[in-house]
Image (cartoon, rainbow, N blue to C red):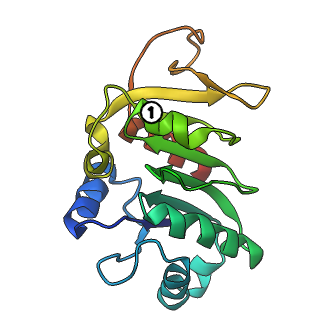
Amino acid sequence: MTLILCPGVHSAQLTQSFLNEMAPVCGDSVVFPTECYLAYSPWQLTQFLETTLNHTQLHQPAIFIGFSAGVVAAIATAWWWQFNGRSVKALIALDGWGVPLRGSFPIHRMSHDRFTHWSSTLGESLEDCFYADPAIEHLDLWRSPSSAYGQWIRPTSEGSLLEDVSLGSAPRSSSAQITAAHFLRMLLQRYRS
């Protein structure tokens, strides 16, 4: 499995903080160095992956995690990855507000507040999603996902999203909170198994 992280336009320290909090599930990831490249450029991300990954990594199934402007590069590169006969296990978009997310692979949105979640998912068919509640600052979702409490949203059988925060066999009407870090770990475990 190749885990590809696509940060946004921010300091490298924020990404290092994300990696520290998400260790060990993100410990073996490939990080697109947005301090050297345009975070939103799928062409530059593609070139970076082609020159950085070894043959085995290039032909393993991939999970893309994008944040903010990095979601633009992540979704387009995931399409490119798949177009070239490679497998995309999933794409996880953290605060990719306004970026249309479509693909023939599972796509998950995570948002720093309810409004961003609602306005980003209009008309999209998505898998499980998350939004912070109470709202947090945009950069805090990436810097410190373990401090972002919120709602886990699950799709209904009709394809629309249903607010559901249950964490197991509890009924759908149960009320519980989950952190963004827990949600991400759950998704990564799901797609790595």
Frontmost residue, 13 versus 188:
13
Q: Which amino acid does label 1 sit on?
A: Phe
Q: State left or right for residue 157 relative to residue 149.
A: right
Q: Which quadrant of the figure has residue 148?
A: top left
Q: Which quadrant of the figure has residue 127?
A: top right
Residue at image coords 55%, 56%: 99
Residue at image coords 67%, 63%: 88
Instruction: Work out whether 127 lies above or below 82.
Output: above
The reply to whether residue 1 is visible in this rendering is no
Disc 1 packing (10 Å; few <14; some 14–19; many ≥20): few
Residue at image coords 29%, 62%: 15
Residue 1 on image: x %, y %:
57, 65
Residue 43 on image: x %, y %:
55, 83
Q: State left or right for residue 182 relative to residue 98.
A: left
Label 1 element class: helix
Frontmost residue, 89 versus 122:
122
Frontmost residue, 19 versus 65:
65
Residue 164 on image: x %, y %:
56, 20
Frontmost residue, 65 versus 75:
75
What residue sits right under mark 1 in the picture? 115
Q: Which quadrant of the figure has residue 34?
A: bottom left
Q: State left or right for residue 178 relative to residue 18.
A: right
The reply to whether residue 23 is visible in this rendering is yes
Q: Looking at this rendering, what residue extends furthest in the bottom direction?
A: 51
Residue 192 on image: x %, y %:
58, 53
Residue at image coords 38%, 65%: 7
How many marks can you see?
A: 1
